[in-house]
Image (cartoon, helix red, strand yellow):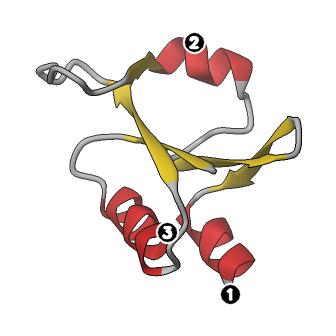
Amino acid sequence: MYTVYTKPQCTFCDQAKALLKTKGLPYREIHFDVGQPKVDGVEYVNVAEFKAQNPQAKTAPQIFVQEGDAQVHVGGFTELRARLG
């Protein structure tokens, strides 16, 4: 299972989700809270807290995959595309 952290109006975020859908891979989307209006049923994360826990994260999307008991950082869309071939 992949986890995709996204922000509004992000082309690379949309491309990452589309790639996962095309490959038939399940994912969970979590939105970076950047002051946008909130939507019921949508999961949000505070950007500052996320960056504090993931200092390697510089852009959106940020993608992780569950491998066994570990949550592994994939990177952004470019890294996801390379990983999935």
Q: Which residue is mark 1?
A: 85
Residue 55 lies left or right of residue 2; in this view the side is: right
Along the line of sight, the residue nearer the viewer: 47 or 45: 45
Residue flagged by tag 1: what amino acid is it? Gly
The answer to whether the residue labelled 2 contacts the one labelled 1, judged by CB atoms less than 8 Å apart, is: no
Q: Which residue is depicted at the point 65% across and 38% down?
A: 57
Q: In the rendered view, would you say 33 is above or below 30?
A: above
Left or right of 36 in this view: 28: right
Q: Residues within 10 Å of mark 3 (few under 14, many from 20)?
A: some
In the displayed structure, 11 sits above or below 66; it is below
Residue 28 pos. (x, y %): 47, 43
Question: Which of marks 3 and 1 precedes in the sequence?
Answer: 3
Q: Residue at x 67, y 54 (%)?
A: 75
Q: Amino acid at mark 2?
A: Glu
Q: Residue extending furthest bottom?
A: 85
State the residue position of label 3: 20
Give the mark nearest the N terminus, 3 or 2.
3
Numbered-mark total: 3
Give me the C-alpha separation between circle 2 and circle 1: 31 Å
Q: Is residue 1 visible?
A: yes
Q: Are marks 1 and 3 in contact (CB under 8 Å)?
A: no
